[in-house]
Structures are given as structure tokens and as C-alpha cells.
Image (cartoon, rainbow, N blue to C red):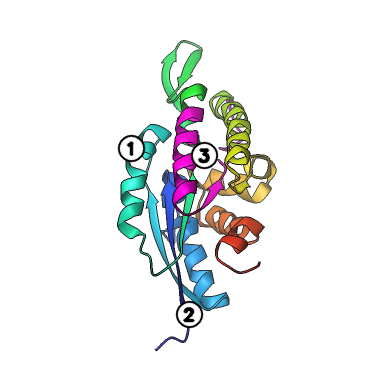
Amino acid sequence: MSDAKIGHRICCFGDSLVNGVRDGEKGGWPMRLGRRMLAEAKRDVTVYNLGIRAETTEGLKARWKFEAGLRMVPEFPSVLMFGFGVHDANHAEERGEETSMRVSPASSAANAAEIIGEASKLATTLWIGPQAVIDGGKSSREINERLEGLNQIYLETARGFDVPYLDLLDTTLGDDTWQRALRRGDGYHPDKVGYDLLADLIWDWDGWKRAVDLID
């Protein structure tokens, strides 16, 4: 029988980079955080990986609150974690040399504000900023440029709601480990090593540590 302390219920919402697409171990960074909580902090937390492949903020805003409600119970503290943006910034249509985003910056900003604003009223909320796609050709450069704009919007939105925001865009754009992991993946999703890196970055973040009572 484990002597680990029963702890938080952690709901991780977002897209394929939350779900763990291309992760050889499966489960992405949410699974890794749960595993480390048990092994290192002796906390038997319940982690729900609620990422959906290719989901944009349009889909997320329609489902997250219902799904969170099914998993939140008064007996245990809840943490709501969100990670999105890459699929909003992805190409929707191609017209010659021009492409359009799947979700416009204005709509993505409005969706994010609705999601994070509502979540922050319900439980401790953490926001994981979007990660860069591969630093390669014109298509991926365009997506990263769009992500730069969304990242700034998201950062300001998080400040407005006093929600901790982990800004990962510059880190992942310039990190050789991440970029190599993307090359071994599909350019949008890393392999196992990339998810290891994401989990490490989140684990070392004070926002995470405070949310799960690892620090005051």
C-alpha cells in the first residue's frame, strides 16, 4: 500500500501538444508531471489529460467547463491547466502565396479570455503558453510569427486575470533540444525528448509549484 499523500485533481486541457502526439511514452507532459509528483513529492495526484488533437480555441471553449465539472470534487483541490495556440495559428486556407489562420487573432484572443476568465473563477488556473513549431521553411516561419503575436496577447490576458503564464515561445524557438525533437517528430509535435523538456520546464516553474503546494 502506498504511503503517498492523496492530493490534487489536475485537469490538463488543450490540443495535441497537451495530448502528447508523437510521444513514444504516450501521455505528454501531463503524464510526466503526475509521475514526478508521486515519485519525488510523494503526492498521489489525479491527472486528467484532456488534450484533443488539432483542437483550436473554438472547440476548447465549447467543452472544457463541462469536462472539468465532471472531475472536480469538493474533497480535493482542483487545478485547471491550459495549453493552446498552435492550432489557432496553423494554416486554414491557401490562396497562392497567402494563407489564413484557422482562428483569427481577434477570435483567439476573445476565446482565450473567455476560457481563462471562467476557469480562474472555478479553481486554481495555470496557463502554458504555445511552443514554437520547427524553425524551418516559409510555412513554419509564418506559423511562428503568428504565434509571437498570439503569445503577447495571451500574456497580457493572463496578467489581466492574475493567472500564472509560462511563456515558452522564445525558449522553444531557440532551444536546440526542442528543435531536434521537432525534427524527429513531424515539425509540429516533438518526440519523447521534447515532451521530457516541456515537463521539466513546467516542473521547475514557480506557478506550478505553488499550485500544487510544493512551495508557499
* Secondary structure type for disc 3: loop
Circle 1 residue? 62
Amino acid at the residue labelled 1: Ala
Q: How crowded is mark 2: few (under 14 residues within 10 Å), some or many (20 or more)?
A: few
Asked if one can make out residue 161 in the rendered structure from this viewpoint, the answer is yes
Above or below: residue 29 compared with residue 128: below
Q: Residues within 10 Å of mark 3 (few under 14, many from 20)?
A: some
Q: What stretch is highlighted in magenta?
A: 108-137
Relative to 197, is 111 on the left or the right?
A: left
For the residues marked 2 and 1, what is the alpha-carbon distance in whole angstroms? 34 Å
Q: How many labels does the image show?
A: 3
* Secondary structure type for disc 2: strand
Circle 3 residue? 187
Q: How crowded is mark 1: few (under 14 residues within 10 Å), some or many (20 or more)?
A: few
- Give the residue displayed 34% in from the left and 59% down from the top: 71
Circle 2 residue? 5
Amino acid at the residue labelled 3: Gly
Asked if one can make out residue 20 in the rendered structure from this viewpoint, the answer is no
Amino acid at the residue labelled 2: Lys
For the residues marked 3 and 1, what is the alpha-carbon distance in whole angstroms? 28 Å
- Residue 99 image position (x, y, % from top left): 48, 17
- Give the residue displayed 50% in from the left and 34% down from the top: 113
* Secondary structure type for disc 1: helix
Q: Nearer the viewer, mark 2 or mark 3?
A: 2
Q: Does the magenta stretch include residue 107?
A: no
Q: Earlier in the sequence, mark 2 or mark 1?
A: 2
- Give the residue displayed 56% in from the left and 49% down from the top: 181
- Residue 57 image position (x, y, % from top left): 42, 35
Q: Earlier in the sequence, mark 2 or mark 3?
A: 2
For the residues marked 2 and 3, what is the alpha-carbon distance in whole angstroms? 39 Å
- Residue 24 image position (x, y, % from top left): 44, 58
